[in-house]
Structures are given as C-alpha cells and as structure tokens.
Amino acid sequence: MVWGVGAALMEDGVIDPRHGQFVNRDLAEYHVPVHADIPAIEAVFLPEVDDKTNPLKIKGLGELGISGAGAALANAVFNACGVRIRSFRRRWTRCWQACRNAAARQGE
C-alpha cells in the first residue's frame, strides 16, 4: 500500500513532447515514501477462498495493494476540497495547489 501511495504522489515521468522521450530517466528524481511520510495503515485480510484463481486456490499479495491507492488518494482530495484530480500522477504539489485554488474560489 505504501508503494501505491508513492506511485500516486511522488513518481512523475516527464516526457519531452518534441521527441516523446523521458527527460528524467535516472533515479535522482525517483522519490519513494519513507516511514515518516505515511501514517499508520491497517491491512485487513479477508478469510475467503477463491477456487477459480488457480489449482492451489490462493492469491498473491505482491502488487495488489497498489491497485487502488491512486483512486483512493484522488477521492480523498475530492472529499477534502471538492476538486477532482484526473491525471494519474497526482504529485502532492498538484493536489495541494488544486485544494488551494478551490479554497480561493470559495472565498471569492
């Protein structure tokens, strides 16, 4: 889940529109969340058996936790300030600016 938060708020692939190539292609700008960036998370495991998945009737946990993180963060921003952020890479600076703009519009 922390990986999903990092993907939604910190990763940003900048593409040169002239050539279609990534401008930031090294790890110097690749930020990942650290312990202090993420509040406590409670993971709930549901006791269910999926007999259609595979012969062992089990599911992997690997990347499943990142699937809904971006949508959950977008909905949290919408619930907090009424602004929909529709770009996938929702850098925290974009979320902050969208909320500030919404607050300024309400104050007018």
Image (spheres, rainbow, N blue to C red):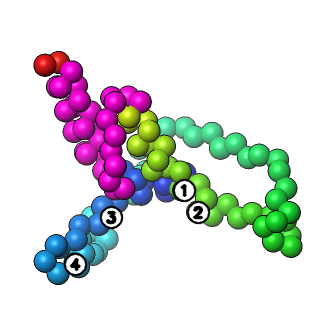
Assess whether residue 60 is covered by the magenta stretch: no
Q: What is the CA distance from the residue labelled 4 to the residue labelled 1?
A: 26 Å
Q: Residues within 10 Å of mark 2 (few under 14, many from 20)?
A: few
**Residue under numbered circle 3:** 30
Q: What element carries label 3?
A: loop
Q: What element carries label 1?
A: loop
Quadrant of the image containing the C terminus: top left
Q: What is the CA distance from the residue labelled 4 to the residue labelled 3?
A: 19 Å
**Residue under numbered circle 2:** 63
Bounds of the magenta segment: 79-106
User: Of the residues under marks 4 and 3, which one precedes in the sequence?
Assistant: 4
Amino acid identity at mark 1: Ser
Amino acid identity at mark 4: Gly
Q: What is the CA distance from the residue labelled 3 to the residue labelled 1?
A: 20 Å
From the viewer's perspective, is 82 left or right of 75?
Answer: left
Q: Quadrant of residue 55?
A: bottom right
Residue 17 in the image: above or below residue 47: below
Q: Quadrant of residue 37?
A: top left
Residue 46 in the image: above or below residue 40: below
Question: Residue 84: horizontal and vertical position, in percent?
Answer: 34, 40
Q: Do the residues labelled 1 and 2 touch (CB within 8 Å)?
A: yes
Secondary structure mainly formed by the magenta segment:
helix
Q: What is the CA distance from the residue labelled 4 to the residue labelled 2?
A: 28 Å
Residue 12 in view of the camera: yes
From the viewer's perspective, is 86 left or right of 44?
Answer: left
Q: Quadrant of residue 19?
A: bottom left
**Residue under numbered circle 4:** 20
The mark found on residue 78 in the picture is none
Q: Which of marks 1 and 2 is in front?
A: 1
User: Of the residues under marks 3 and 2, which one precedes in the sequence?
Assistant: 3
Residue 105 in the image: above or below residue 46: above
**Residue under numbered circle 1:** 67
